[in-house]
Image (spheres, helix red, strand yellow):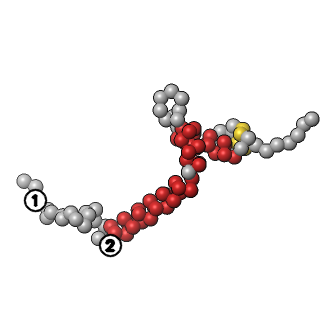
Amino acid sequence: MAHTGTGFFDRKGHFFKTARDATVSDLAALLGQIGEGESLAPGIAYMLLERRAEIERLFAEHDGMVEEEAAMKAARGGGETLDNVAKLPSRPAV
């Protein structure tokens, strides 16, 4: 007898039984071919999804560091030099 079910589709329109499998397929497509022969992308995509919380935390920390770096550069007047590097005076070209 016929029955109904739930399925999930990735961005390419491929059908998957679980949302996790559809998401892994999309992540693998974003990563592209990794390695020679059979791609490592599906395994990496699965690990990315499994470690999502840690990865999001790392990106949040990264964003904070980038903001702090931009604030430090702005406080120095937008210069690219670091605090421990002295800028040499310009000399005329000979």
Q: CA distance from mark 1 to mark 2?
A: 29 Å
Q: Are marks 1 and 2 in contact (CB under 8 Å)?
A: no
Q: Which mark is residue 47?
A: none
Residue 34 on image: x %, y % = 49, 35
Residue 76 on image: x %, y % = 29, 70
Query: Which structural element holds mark 1?
Result: loop
Left or right, 14 with respect to 80, comes to right
Quarter of the figure with residue 87: bottom left
Residue 12 on image: x %, y % = 65, 39
Q: Amino acid at mark 2?
A: Ala
Q: Amino acid at mark 1?
A: Pro
Name the residue beneath numbered marker 2: 75
Name the residue beneath numbered marker 1: 92
Task: Say which quadrant the N terminus sits in.
Answer: top right
Which residue shows up at 32% across the image and 67% down it? 73
Q: Residues within 10 Å of mark 2 (few under 14, many from 20)?
A: few
Residue 55 on image: x %, y % = 52, 54
1 vs 2, front mark: 2
